[in-house]
Image (cartoon, helix red, strand yellow):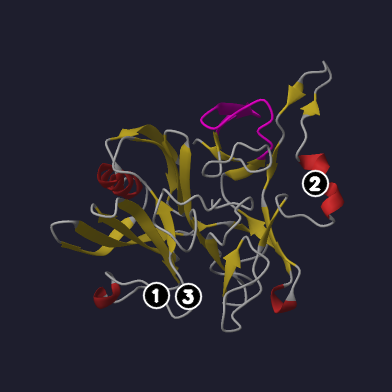
C-alpha cells in the first residue's frame, strides 16, 4: 500500500493527482472520455484493480464534474461487477444492479488531501476550510472464502443525492452518515445501500449497517462513544474495526470490514490529527461539518 498528501489548487487538479496516484499503485485505465462547454466539464474514467490472488478484476467507474455557473465541483463514483462498454463510460446508472451514483462534493479553491491505495482499493480524504469530503473504492476484507463471496466491492463517498458542497447533508462513507452514502455488492449479488437501514427501491435490498456507529442494542452506544483511560489515568481515543452487518431479510449476517478505515471516538482529537495506534499512523477524518465524537473515522496511512 502507498499513501500521499498535499494541497491541490482546486477540484480539477485534485482529479489529476488522484488518477496519477492510483495509476502508480496498481489500477489500470480501461476507458475514458470527456465533454466540455464554456461553463461546464465532465471527465469520466473506468479503472481496473486486482484482488489478493492477482487474477480477479475490480472495476471502479469515476467522473469529475464541474459547473462554474452553479459553483458545483464533485467526483462521482460507481462500482461495476464487470467491464462497462465504451459507450457507457460517460454515463452513470448503466450498471444494472446499481440505482444511483455517489458524489463527493468538492471546491474550486485549494483542497488539502490525503490518499492511500493498494491494487485492491483506494481511499481519499479532502478538506477545504472546515468541510470534509471522503471516499472509499474497492474491495473490503470479507468474512468468508472467495467461493462464498467472490466480489466484496464497496463504493462510498459523501452522499447519493447532491454534488453541492454548500448543502450540509451530514454525509460520509462510514456509519455516521445521516444519508445513504455507499453501495456494497453483497454475497447475494445485490447492491445494498450503506449505512442506512432501508435499502434501495425496487425490492433490491434492506440496507447495510456499519458497527459500531449503528449498534444493537442501542444501550451499548456509551461504551464506544466515550474515552477510555489507560493505567495512568490518561484518556485515550479507542480505534476499533468497522463491521458491515444486516439484520433484515435474506442479507442477514455479518459481512466484513473496510480495508484500512476504522471507527474512532475522536475524544481529545480533531479532524486532520495524525493518531498513532499499535505503531501505525491514522488520519482522523470528520463527517462533513460535524465535530461530534461519534461521527469521525480513522484512515490508515500506509
Labels 1 and 3: the sequence-earlier one: 1
Mark 2 lies on residue: 221
Between 249 and 11, the residue placed more toward the observer is 11
> Where does residue 165 sit, x and y in percent of width and height?
41, 49
Q: Is residue 11 visible?
A: yes
Mark 1 lies on residue: 93
48 vs 184, left or right, is left
Q: Which residues are magenta?
A: 264-283
Labels 2 and 3: the sequence-earlier one: 3
Q: Residue 5's quadrant in the figure?
A: top left
Between 33 and 24, the residue placed more toward the observer is 33
Mark 1 vs 3: CB contact within 8 A: yes
Disc number at residue 99? 3
Looking at the rendered structure, the secondary structure element under dot 3 is loop
Looking at the rendered structure, the secondary structure element under dot 1 is loop
> Where does residue 208 sit, x and y in percent of width and height?
65, 65
Which residue appears at 73% of the width and 78% of the height?
249
Q: Residue lying farthest top?
A: 232
Q: Residue 292's quadrant in the figure?
A: top right
Q: Is residue 58 visible?
A: no
- Is 84 placed above or below 144 here? below
Between 148 and 255, the residue placed more toward the observer is 255
> Where does residue 260 sit, x and y in percent of width and height?
56, 44
Mark 1 vs mark 3, CA separation in Å: 6 Å
Amino acid at each position: 500500500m502507498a499513501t500521499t498528501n498535499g494541497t491541490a489548487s482546486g477540484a480539477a487538479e485534485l482529479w489529476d493527482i488522484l488518477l496519477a496516484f492510483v495509476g502508480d499503485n496498481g489500477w489500470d485505465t480501461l476507458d475514458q472520455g470527456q465533454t466540455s462547454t464554456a461553463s461546464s466539464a465532465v471527465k469520466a474514467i473506468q479503472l481496473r484493480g486486482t484482488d489478493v490472488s492477482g487474477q480477479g478484476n475490480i472495476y471502479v467507474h469515476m467522473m469529475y464534474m464541474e459547473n462554474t455557473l452553479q459553483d458545483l465541483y464533485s467526483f462521482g463514483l460507481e462500482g461495476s461487477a464487470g467491464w462497462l462498454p465504451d459507450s457507457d463510460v460517460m454515463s452513470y446508472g448503466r450498471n444494472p444492479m446499481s440505482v444511483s451514483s455517489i458524489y463527493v462534493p468538492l471546491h474550486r479553491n485549494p483542497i488539502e488531501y490525503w490518499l492511500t491505495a493498494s491494487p485492491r482499493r483506494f481511499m481519499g480524504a479532502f478538506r477545504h476550510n472546515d468541510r470534509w469530503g471522503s471516499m472509499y473504492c474497492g474491495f473490503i476484507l470479507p468474512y468468508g472464502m472467495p467461493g462464498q463471496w467472490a466480489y466484496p466491492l464497496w463504493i462510498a463517498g459523501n452522499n447519493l443525492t447532491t454534488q453541492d458542497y454548500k448543502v450540509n447533508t451530514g454525509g460520509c462513507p462510514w456509519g455516521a452518515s445521516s444519508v445513504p452514502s455507499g453501495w456494497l455488492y453483497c454475497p447475494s449479488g445485490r447492491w445494498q445501500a450503506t449505512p442506512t437501514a432501508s435499502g434501495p427501491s425496487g425490492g433490491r435490498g434492506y440496507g447495510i449497517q456499519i458497527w459500531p456507529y449503528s449498534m444493537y442494542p442501542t444501550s451499548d452506544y456509551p461504551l464506544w462513544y466515550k474515552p477510555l483511560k489507560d493505567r495512568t489515568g490518561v484518556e485515550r481515543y479507542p480505534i476499533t474495526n468497522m463491521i458491515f452487518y444486516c439484520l433484515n431479510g435474506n442479507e442477514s449476517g455479518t459481512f466484513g470490514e473496510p480495508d484500512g478505515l476504522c471507527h474512532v471516538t475522536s475524544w481529545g482529537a480533531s479532524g486532520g490529527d495524525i493518531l498513532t495506534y499499535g505503531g501505525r499512523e491514522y488520519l482522523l477524518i470528520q463527517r462533513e461539518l460535524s465535530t461530534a465524537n461519534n461521527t469521525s473515522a480513522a484512515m490508515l496511512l500506509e
